[in-house]
Amino acid sequence: MVYSDLDGTLLDHETYSFDAARQALDRLQAHAVPLIFCTSKTRAETEIWRARLDNTHPFIVENGGALFIPQGYFPMNLQAPARRDGYEVFEFGDPYVELVGALRAAAEESSCQVRGFHDMTVEEVGESCGIPTDQARKAREREYDEPFEITAGESDRLLAAIERRGKRWTRGGRFYHVLGANDKGLCVGLLSRLYRQTFREVSTAGLGDSPNDAAFLRVVDIPVIIRSEASTGLQSMIPGARVTDLPGPQGWNRAVLDILRSPP
């Protein structure tokens, strides 16, 4: 099984292209190796990339806010807490409205200038992310995680105020994120157990490029850090991880091909 972040990892940070990873993607498909997206993107956004990559496997959204498993994917009864739109859904994150409220209160307490997705228009989200308007609209369909921007030098005060409200935060390639009980590691652990119940012998690899990927890289057999501007901090968090020489899909492609040539 291969768990992968999207932005800055499988997708180029600037262009969102995955062309440079095509060889490894084809090899995974040829060998029937599940590719599990583990991303900060919303479900609506992630479904775009599942369609483009012809991916029918489970996926993890909004920094571990929820795990979505297509109904009937596993032979056993999953007893999922929720069923929605053809998915078995395991939710870990707090409701979005709570996160927005906590961010606003933390900004007021710390006297910090903060701009979250809830403050931005669709056009502003598209400009900040470098994505078309239709994708930006889906990026704002948030359920478990609020990305935000903050003025340089003010982050420590704001982040401490967020924590005082019982919420958590992380940082991705473009934005900070305010979270509840979201945890990519818990989602990956749960899904890996389900695969092992079905297939018995399962090896797991994970690829990410930012500190918000640390939780799931800690629980896979082969953690891989894709080189990026944000990956330096991640390397100190996952000291035993492999680190690619190349960034984005170029590094992703080489790392996956190496894993397939020499599995654990």
Image (spheres, grey):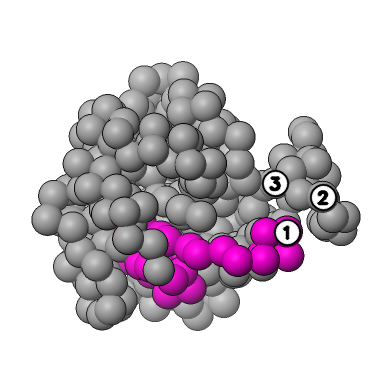
Residue 209 within the magenta-colored segment of the rendering: yes
Q: Earlier in the sequence, mark 3 or mark 1?
A: 3
Q: Residue at x 48, y 63 (%)?
A: 204
Q: Is residue 202 left or right of residue 69?
A: left
Residue position marked by numbered label 2 in the rendering:
75
Q: Earlier in the sequence, mark 1 or mark 2?
A: 2
What is the distance, in whole Å, between disc 3 and disc 2 at their CAs?
12 Å
What segment is highlighted magenta in the picture? 196-223
Q: What crowding class fits label 3: few (fewer than 14 Cα within 10 Å), some (14-19), or many (20 or more)?
A: many
Task: Tell me: residue 220, above or below residue 17.
Answer: below
Q: Quadrant of residue 180?
A: bottom right
Q: Are marks 3 and 1 in contact (CB under 8 Å)?
A: no
Label 2: state its secondary structure.
loop
* Mark 3 vs mark 2: in front: 2
Label 3: state its secondary structure.
strand
Q: Are marks 1 and 2 in contact (CB under 8 Å)?
A: yes
Q: Nearer the viewer, residue 66 or 119?
A: 66
- How many numbered circles does the render carry? 3
x and y percentages locating residue 119 in the rendered image: 44, 40
Residue 95 visible here = yes
What is the distance, in whole Å, between disc 3 and disc 1 at their CAs?
14 Å
Which label was assigned to residue 82? none
x and y percentages locating residue 239 in the rendered image: 26, 80
x and y percentages locating residue 69 in the rendered image: 70, 46
Of the residues shown, which amino acid type is indicated by label 3?
Answer: Ile
Residue position marked by numbered label 3 in the rendering:
69
Of the residues shown, which amino acid type is indicated by label 2?
Answer: Pro
Q: What crowding class fits label 1: few (fewer than 14 Cα within 10 Å), some (14-19), or many (20 or more)?
A: few
x and y percentages locating residue 154 in the rendered image: 25, 67
Q: Is residue 69 left or right of residue 107?
A: right
Residue position marked by numbered label 1 in the rendering:
198
